[in-house]
Image (tube, coloured by chain):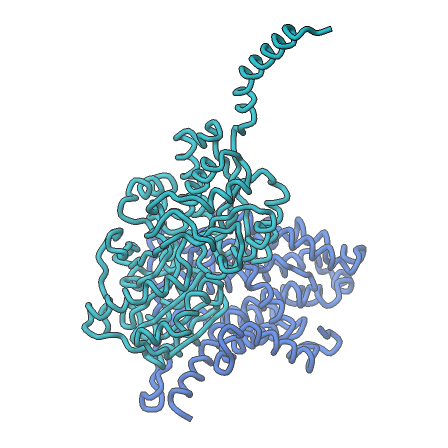
Amino acid sequence: MSAQLIENMLQALVAGLLVGAIYGLMCVGLALIFGIMRVINFAQGDFMMLGMYAAFYLVLGLATQLGLTGGITPYIGILLTGPFLFVVGYAIHGFLISQVSGTRSARLEGEGHYAQLILTLGIALVIQNGALIAFGSQLISIRTPLSASAWTIPLLDGDVMLFVNKARGVAALISVATIVALTVLIGRSRLGKALRASADNPDAATFMGIDVARAHRVAFGLGVAVTAIAGGLLATNLPFHPFVGIDYVIVMYAGVVLGGMGSIGGAFWGGMTIGLVQQLSTLILPTQLQNTAIFVVFLLIVFFRPQGFFGRVAERT
Amino acid sequence: MTSRYDLTRRTLLGTAAASMALPGIVRAQNPTEVKVALLVPISGMYSRFGTVMRMGAEMALDHINAEGGVRSLGGAKLKLVVLDCGDTTEKAKNAAQRMVAQEPDIVAASGSYLSSFTLAVTEVTERAQLPVLTLSYSDLITARGFKYVFQTSATAASQAEQALPEILKLAETASGRKPQTVAIVTDNTGASVASVKPMREGLLQRLGLKLVVDETFTPPIADATPLIQKVRAARPDLFFFLPTVISDAKLVLEKMNEFGMGQGKVPTISFGIAIAMPDILNTVSADLLQGVLTCVGNWGVKGQEKLIAELKSRYNEPWMDQNAISTYGDMWIIKEALEKAGKADRVAVADALRNLDLGPSKYYPGGLTKFDAMGRRVGAGLTVVQWQNGVPYTVFPTELATAKPFWPKSS
């Protein structure tokens, strides 16, 4: 195998891992809402877009108001987006989503899924057009010099040179750290137990004294916050506009289904798989088919393992 | 019984009265305003381009109306109807259908930025016999035998034919060496595909260039690594990059820099406007753009300083790009066609456009303000724009240039 071929393969693998880590984080956000709470949320991409704008203005605020201009500033701003969007998600669930989900869904046709679909599509339209009015149509991105520079790793006596984009590298590390923190929160904390109990069996959770409605609001807020952080991380490399969310909603749903409904870790690996397939497919297929490759692999996985990577057989796609 | 005298007198009186009333009747038939449409993306990932086209149209209509409107229609004012063709060809086609159904008194339209959109839109407007002026590049737009579409830009194939020899001449003069190899990375939108078609089909060979990378992608891309890795492996003398989305331009330019090929190390030549939009400076450092050339159908040029200044002050735009100036010109052409047609009727306006001859072009580079049998502007030229210290200046054609070109220093 020639050094050039090895370099091409390794470079595509690195790109796939870095992109996949951010996709994974996005998918984890949706997994909390769709995979666990079974709320269909077509506004998730637009919450991600709000996260991008929130991160942009927080970074701008940190730079202009507090004079923070170092390389770490964008990432502080992006992490601060989490709590901000948590409040937004918590409030939207309280006012709107709760009307068509949780205990109220039992009274609605299709367990409330039709109503959720229409409501969240409506929310998506309001957010998109509201953002267009508020922020304009100009493309912006979170500027960092890291996005145009790379760590270079020479391999095979320098015959192979591997480039790891610094902004994507940092974003991937933050993605993994966020998922670890979320897993600890869900798995170990009292709040996490309440969330899991409310998702598994709301009636039993109510009898155990858990405020199920509040737990659902918290889960929705957490899902929005996590996806918003992923959006902020994506925005260090990718310019965005008020309609950017549409491009990523399908990636998120595909990732959650691939990983297995109800599994947070699975959603991350689902997103990672999408990133890897997207980038590695270019080694053998024309680049313009990279998104087609994602859905071919998606269909194959769903065909041979309908429950996804980590889903239970009872929860087939 | 009516005598011959009485009858004559009455006839005379009637005729006199009718003669006195006639100008009034004619005046009453003239509309007070005439609707012209702008069918462009106002939402979605192409919304920025449509927004700038709207600026050009608004400026033109204000100028036309301030100068007395359409004189042959008794000074009727032009009224702009803006329709959003969204971010997909399907939405663009739906918007065109809405336009012809809901606004039957529109006499002409301008649109729709992306060639793919224009191709879809004109399928509808052709059936409705509504003339459409377009700045889109694809040769296919005016190669389908349509009678109601008029292309003001040079077609994509023509632009490639005109631009490449000039760029090679510049490279050879500046570096003392003729480029030998070229990499093409293009998106798969109509204009980009049309631009690279003649290159693939013999133009590069005729110019002595060897194509070493030929990659096509679907916009928007998530990461440019696979594309630029192939360019890095081939190390071409020239890099032809054809995006229509600003985010793709950013990802590719930054990846070029990351892989040690940016800032002129591999000279980058683009086709189209995406790489020279003001928004790109919100996302990419000006250093990475320095020296990048792009071949565009139209741009703010020498002699348009007043218009450029107005655009800057009125809309806070840093420079006048193709979308603003071409749409501005389109509105003036529609006005002149209305003057010639003498009535606010779309078929008459289309007929007037076919026979229009306003002499040397005022708002488009090169050629005449006259359309050939296919609907293409006669002798349409192009502009080559180069990023110099954070501003994209027109560097070709020389007589319209606002700055002198330079060749980026290769390492």
Q: Is residue A95 left or right of residue A64?
A: right
Of B238 and B379, which appears nearest the observer? B379
Q: Quadrant of residue A35?
A: bottom right
Q: Identify the image quadrant of the C terminus of chain A.
A: bottom right
Q: Is residue B269 visible?
A: yes
Q: Residue furthest bottom?
A: A1
Q: Is residue B207 left or right of residue B128?
A: left
Residue B218, percent from left and from top: 50, 68
Colour of chain B in the image: cyan
Image point (63%, 64%), residue name: A191
Q: Is residue B69 left or right of residue B173?
A: right
Is residue A8 depicted above or below B331 in this figure?
below
Q: Quadrant of residue B287?
A: bottom left
Residue B43, percent from left and from top: 53, 51
Q: Quadrant of residue B4?
A: top right
Residue A270, percent from left and from top: 59, 75
Q: Is residue A78 visible?
A: no
Image point (45%, 79%), residue name: A12
Image point (44%, 61%), residue name: B244
Image point (31%, 64%), residue name: B288
Q: Is residue B262 left or right of residue A266?
A: left
Residue B145, percent from left and from top: 53, 57
Q: Identify the image quadrant of the N terminus of chain A.
A: bottom left
Chain (blue): A
Total marks drawn? Answer: 0
